[in-house]
Every structure is written in structure tokens, then in C-alpha cells.
Amino acid sequence: MSRGKHPVPLDLPLPQTTAEGLSKQDSAYSALRQAILEKRLPAGCRLPSTRTLAQRWSMSRGTLEVVFDRLRSEGYVSRLCGSGTQVCAVVPDLYLSPPARALVRPERVDSLQSQPFAVRAGQPFVARLADPALFPLQRWARALTRALANAPAQLLCDPDPGGLPALRQQIAEYLGQHRGIACDPRQVMVTTGIRHGLDLLARSLLQPGDKVCIEDPGYQSAKGLFALAGARLVPIPVQEEGIDVQCLQRHRDARMVYVTPAHQAPLGMTMPVSRRLALLDWARRSEAWVVEDDYDSEFNYQGAPLAALKSLDREDRVIYCGSFNKTLFAGLRVGFMLVPEALRPRLLATLQSTGRSVGVIEQVALADYIASGAFLRYLRAARQAYQERRDQLLAILQREAPGCYTVSGQQAGLHLLLELPPGSDEARFCQAAAQAGLFLQGVAESCQQVRRPPAVIIGYAALSLAQIRFSGSRLAALLVAEAQGRDEG
């Protein structure tokens, strides 16, 4: 043993997992953290390697790597290449320990599942967003540098409330070339994303008690935003071809209808042209506004996507919403709306009174990024990557769980719908998946009045191929077990 170094403590007690119902990961974390707090692992002490602890505690090295990374992120230990893992001199427990009442125990899984899932990269299978690892940060950094270097002082202090003209020009050209929408830059209004746009519409156009028709099942955040404005929400069933327009005919007094025609959220079907035309005819006769959420239309894997619903709009009744947060990276916070001329003054007034939230530097950089052709190059590369991930996931399920499921909505977007064996308990399946490290959102959470066969939403875009191979096999095993349980029952 080298002079001045603490011995590696191999007599750490075996973590207890049964007494408090903790997982192996949580129990190992608690054991090491407690040993540090009680000075059984003093400052400067080098922890055993994950290989050594894995053998002693009969755990996987992967579990202990997660535990060590968690301790490092919370400031209990430091990890340096070649020096192992050492206890930090200053333990930040006073500042980092949550109150006891805030601890989440496993018995609260059901109540947690009733809340909206946090969609994040790397988490199977709620990764329904663009993979930030694919985004070319160096190219974006150059665009930001040019934006800072070339922006005149007047632009920095007096931005256009509707958005930077150069960015609106690029958006209008992109929509004309790739979404079939002939539009003028003046129609474009820059937002922080689709939810910001929906909030502006709700604040500007709705009065308490106004009727708003929404898809059932549908996007939960849209429902919440319209409800905050005091709207009277009317769920309209979604059929195999999209929202039921015949059902809409019974609501000619509706102020607005919200739809996701390119890749219905969450079922994934694409609304055909015939139904789109019927929807526009209903809007014309009802003098209602149609909000088109085109959240992931850039990612179509079977050829060119249908032109946007807005491209068929001859009466200027469609409010088109798009977002770069879904195509580039979630933290960008830049989206846009195409606003009918009749609504523009009202929406601009609301935007000015509530504060413009998109930074001018980000707008200048994004305009440069699009104009340079980098945006289209990125979309092509991302589309290929997401298709490869989708194909690998489907191949794993087909190989390891044939006949135990059906899929829909896989032709486009960042997620697909996985229908479970008939008679399955959707909530129980999601709970079993959570115990296996897979976080699934059941389609029932997106339903208002309709009742659909048990199914789960599978987000795959922001997962690596290695994560898909590992998690796909776990999902396949759960499907096989579910199907066998149904057969035996």
C-alpha cells in the first residue's frame, strides 16, 4: 500500500433490498452514501472498483457503474481516469438531501404513471424527440458566432414582435418547397414551440365556454392549454383515417378544432386527402378555425409525406403550427405558426403583451443555418438514422416475439403504437415494463371518452442502436410473457 493512501475497504456491508423495498441500484447507492456520511469511507479514500463490488455484492457491473456516476454527479465522489473513484473532501449532503416526505417509494408507481411522462433522450421507450447526439454542434456554434458578430445594434434592441424577418423568410421558403404551402413571410409568427403557439391561440381566440373539438385519443398538452383558457372541450373519436368528421358535424357551433393529420398523436395514422377536404368543408360551413399540429412530418420513411392540410386551405381557416424543437433539438425553443390574416393583429397584440420569448440571436443563427443548406442536410441524415433505429426495433420484436403484438404508425414520425395481446391489462403491462427498466406510456392516458384495445406508445428516435438492441429484447420478452399469460388464462 502506498504511503498516505487509505486502504480499499472490502468489508462494506451487503446492501439490504428487502427491508425497505429498494431496488438493487437504490440499495447500493444508499449503502455507499451512508458509509461516506458516517466516515466509514473517509475523505480521500478510494472506493473498491465496480468489478470488485459486483463480485462481493452479487450485482452487475452496469448497476454499480450507474451508482458510482450518481454519487459523482451529487458530489460525494470524484472519478478520474487512472486514479479510480475517491471520496470527496467536502460532502454536500446538507444541500442535496431531500426531505424524507419527498422520497418516492415503489408503492407509488400507479400514481406516478397517471402523470404525463417526461420525454427525454436515452430513456426506453419514452424517447419521442430528436436525438441531440445527431445535431452538428460545431456547425451550430459557427452560426451563433456569425449571428453575434454581424447583428447590428438596432436589431438587438428592437426585434420584430412576429419574429426576425430573415427567419420568417427562410421558414416560408421551406414550407413552400417541402410542405406544399404557398405562403408569405408576413404570415409566419415565431414562437418557442407548438405549445407556445397553442397557448397564444387559446389566450387570443377563446372565451370561457367556447367549444373546442379535440382528437380522442389526442395530445394531452393541447387539451390542458385549451382548458386553462376556459374552453368547453369536446372529444371527437379518431378512426382509422383520422378524426371522425361525421361526428364533427354535430358540433357546428365549435370555435376551433385541433388535429394532427400528418402523424396522429398518439395513434400514428396519416389523414387521407378525402378526409382533409371534408374537415376543411366543415370548418368553412361552421366558420371555425382548424389548428394543424405538424409536429414531426419531416420524418417519413415510405416516401414523400402528404402535403400539409394548410396547403389545401382556400378559405384561410387553418392555423399551421410547426417546431424546430422536434427536428433539431428539444432545447432550441424555436417554433412557428402560419397565421390567417384575420387573426394576425389579435395574436400579435397577445404576443406583445405577454412578452416575446425567442431570443434574436437564436433566430439569426437559425436563419443562417437554414439558408446555408445545413438544415436540409441534417434532416436527411436524421431521417436515415431514425429509420435504421425503427427497423432494428421492429426486427428484434419480429424475431423474438412473433405473433405477440401488432404495430401501427411506424411509417413516419418519432414513435409507433404497439398493440398488446388481446385481453392484456395495459396498466399492469406498463408497471411490469417499469420494473424491467422500460418506461411505457399506455394509450389509455391519451383517451377522454373512447376505449381502445390495450396498446403502448414506443418512442425510439433518441435511443442508440445499442440501447434499442438491449431494450428491444426486454420488451420482446415482456410481450411473450404477456401472450403466454393470456393463452393460459
Image: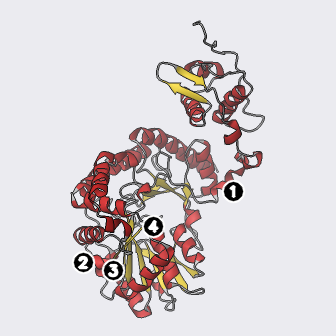
Q: In this orientation, does residue 379 appear?
A: no
Residue marked by disc 3: 274
Q: Is residue 251 left or right of residue 394?
A: right
Nearer to us of marks 2 and 4 is 4
- Earlier in the chain: of badge 2 and badge 3, it is 2
- Amino acid marked by disc 3: Ser
Q: Is residue 255 left or right of residue 42?
A: left
Residue marked by disc 1: 111
Nearer to us of marks 1 and 3 is 1
158, 106: nearer the viewer: 158
Residue 357, disc = 4
- Amino acid marked by disc 2: Ala
Cα gap from disc 2 to disc 1, whole angstroms: 47 Å
Q: Element under label 1? A: helix
- Earlier in the chain: of badge 2 and badge 1, it is 1
Residue 316, compared with residue 37, is above or below; it is below
Q: Element under label 3? A: helix
Quadrant of res 174: bottom left
Nearer to us of marks 1 and 4 is 4
- Amino acid marked by disc 1: Ser
Name the residue located 36 percent from the left edge and 84 percent from the top edge: 340
Residue 182, disc = 2
Q: Residues within 10 Å of mark 1 (few under 14, many from 20)?
A: few
- Earlier in the chain: of badge 2 and badge 4, it is 2
